Image (spheres, rainbow, N blue to C red):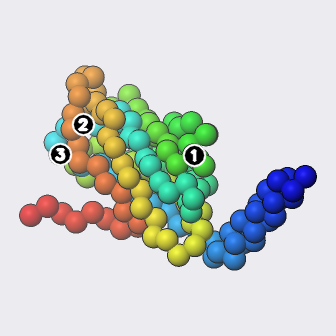
Amino acid sequence: MKARLLSVLALAVALTARADQPVRFTAMDVWFDASDHKLAAYQVEVRYDVEHIKIVGLEGGDHAAFADAPYYDRRGLTGGRIVIAAFSTADGLPTGRVRLARIHLQVEGDVVPDLQLRLMTTGDAEGRRITPGVSVLPANTEPRKEK
C-alpha cells in the first residue's frame, strides 16, 4: 500500500513539474543539396529530445515533386526517433538546394530544438544512390551558400 501511495505521489509531482514548463510551437525545415543530381527519393532518420519535444505535424517541401508530406511511422511522433521518406516519379525533379520537409514541433521548457539527422538513403531518377548534403534549420531560414 505504501509503495502504491508513493508511486502515485511521485507521478503527481512529476506531472505538476511538467505543467509549470512553458510550451511553445515551432517548425524546422529539412534541406537537401543534391548539387547537379536530380533527387528522386530520400529517407532520413530524425532524432530529438523525447523529454521536451513532440512532433505535431509534418508537411512537404517547396518543390512540386515533394510538395506532399513525407511518409513516416506515427510512433515516431513522440518516441524520440522518426524516419521520414518520400519519392517522386515526376519529370521535373529538383536539383541543387531544396527544402523537402517541414517538421512542426511542440517544445516544452526553455530548450532549443536540436534535431539530429542521419541520411539513410537517397536516389536519382535512374535509381542510383547520390549523396546530397542534408541539414535542418528553423523554418523560413535558408542555408548559407557555399563559397
- The circle on residue 79 is 1
**Residue occupying image coordinates x 85% and y 53%:** 4
Location of the C terminus (image quadrant)? bottom left
Kindly indicate the quadrant of the structure image that contains residue 123. top left
Disc 3 residue type (three-letter): Ser
**Residue occupying image coordinates x 55% and y 54%:** 50
Do residues under tags 3 and 2 come within 8 Å of each other at their CB atoms? no
Tell me the SS state at disc 3: loop
Disc 2 residue type (three-letter): Lys
Residue farthest right in this picture: 1
Q: Earlier in the sequence, mark 3 or mark 1?
A: 3
Disc 1 residue type (three-letter): Gly
For disc 2, the neighbor class at 10 Å (few under 14, some 14 to 19, many from 20) is some
Residue 34, compared with residue 55, is above or below; it is above
Kindly indicate the quadrant of the structure image that contains residue 145. bottom left
- The circle on residue 38 is 2
**Residue occupying image coordinates x 37% and y 62%:** 137
- Residue 135: x and y in percent read 31, 54
In the picture, measured across the screen, residue 8 lies left or right of residue 52, that is right
- The circle on residue 35 is 3
